[in-house]
Image (cartoon, helix red, strand yellow):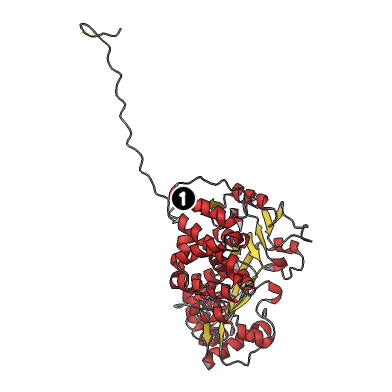
Amino acid sequence: MNRLIRAGLMFGNLFHVSSPALVERYNRALHHLTGKRTKLTDFYIDISGFSPEIGAELGDTLYLNHKGVNRQFILLSMEQRTAPLLNAKFSTSKAVLDEFIGKNEAALFALTAKDAVAGELVNSVYDVSEPARLFDIRRITVEADTTGGTVKDAAKLADMVDQFRGTEDGWYDDVLIAEMITLASKTGDVVRNPVTLETMRFEQRNFWTAHFGGLYVFQDVAHPAAILPSGKDGLDEIPIAHVFDARQRNHIAKFFQLNGLTEPILEARGIKSAAILRQKMDFILIDAVAGQGVGLTDLSRSDLRRLAREHSDMLPPEFHTLGRLVNWAENGGAFPNISSADPVYFYTLRAADTPEAELVNMLLAELAPKDIRQLFICHKDLFYRTYAAWSDAKQAYVTDFLEREYQVDKAGVRDALFGHAPQVEVPPLPRKRKTPPPVPTGPWGAVKRR
C-alpha cells in the first residue's frame, strides 16, 4: 500500500494534528467519548477525527466506531470537512458529517477556535450482530458539543436571560445574576453571538454497510430489495421483499430497471460514451495480461492494441463485446444485443439521475470490478482490498493511471463519468392560427349560405 500512500491515493488529504494545543484538545475529546488518551504528539485525522496512527497505538481501528454503529466524531478544525472518511461502515456517514458541518459552519468555526467539538451519529441500534437489526436503522440524529459543554451552557444561559427579562424583579435576583455571569464567562455573549448547533436528523432508508460481507439495502424505492454481492448464505431471514446475490444477475438487472436506477452509458447525455467504454476495455486488457510478465508502464494507444493482438487468446468475453459496442458507436457497425447474463452487462451501465445515484454507482463498481477507475472512485473499501491481491505490475499500472488521469482533476473526471447534463428545454413551436375554411365558389362568385 506504500505506493498508493506516496501517490496520495490512500490516506490522502487528512488533517495534520501537530501542535501541542490541538493534541491536548483531541485528548480531552477522546477521553470524553471513550475514556482513552493517546501518547502521540503528531498524527493525522479524517473528517470524523479518526486517526490510523492512534488506531494502531490502541490496537483498535474502531475506537470511535464501537461495533461499527453510532459513529463518534471529534472536530478540531473546519479543514477536516475536506478530508475523507476512513473505515466507513455505512455509506451515509460521510454525507451526514459533511452536511452537519456545512449547516453549522459559523458556530463550529467559533467553537473549534477554543475547544474540540465531540459528537455522535445516533440511531436506535447499538448492535448489528443480526442482519435484521440493520432494518431498525431508520433515522440518524447528530448530537454534538464541546468537551466543556459550551453549547449546553449557552442554551442554559439563554434560558436565564429570558427568565431575567421576563421577571419584574429580575434586577434583585442576585443568585440568577451571579449564575449568568459565571456562565457568560464560559460561553460569551449569547445574546449578540448565539452559540447553537442545529439539531439535525437524517433518514437512512437506502444504504450500503460493510457488515455481513457488505450489503446494499434499498427500502425507499418502488420495488424494495437487498443486494448481497458476496453471497447470501445464512442471510435469507432479512425483513425485505427480495434478496439477491451476484449470481442472480437478471434479478438485479430487473431491479435496476423497475426502479429506474440505471441508464446505458451509450444513451447517457453529455458524455463521450465511446471513449468511456474504450477505457473500460483497457482496464479489462490490463487485468488479463498483468500476470504474463509484460511491461505495463508508459503504454500508448498503439501499445495497448499490440498487447490485445499478442494476447487475444487470453482476453475475456467482456473485452470483445465492449469492442463491438465501441465499433457500433464510432463506425456504425452491427449493434450487439447484450442481456443481463452477459459478463459485460453491468460494465455498460451507470447510475441514472436519481437521489440514489452515488449508491447505485457503488454497487455497479462491485458488479463490474475490472473497471479499476470506477472501483477506486465509488468503492474505495473494496478497491483497497482488491488492490492488495494484484500483481506488482498491475499495482504499478493502476497507481500510475489514477495519479495521472484522476488526481489532477477529480471533479472533472467524476463529472465526465457520472454527471448528468441538464435537460434542455425545447421552446414550444408557435401555434398556428386557425384559418377559416375556404368559401365555396360557383361560376358567378361566392355561394351564399342559407
Q: Nearer the viewer, residue 237 or 183?
A: 237
Q: Residue at x 60, y 59 (%)?
A: 313
The quarter of the rendered structure image containing the C terminus is: top left
Residue 415, relative to residue 30: is it above or below? above
Residue 153, relative to residue 353: is it above or below? below
The quarter of the rendered structure image containing the N terminus is: bottom right
Residue 245, relative to residue 201: is it above or below? above
User: Given the image, on which type of amino acid does mark 1 rest?
Assistant: Ala
Based on the displayed image, in which of its 4 quarters is residue 34 positioned? bottom right
Q: Residue at x 56, y 57 (%)?
A: 319
Give residue 382's position: percent from left, percent from top. 63, 69
Provide the residue designation for mark 1. Answer: 329
Confirm whether residue 379 shows in the render: no
Give residue 162's position: percent from left, percent from top. 52, 74
Based on the displayed image, in which of its 4 quarters is residue 343 positioned? bottom right
Give residue 106's position: percent from left, percent from top. 46, 75
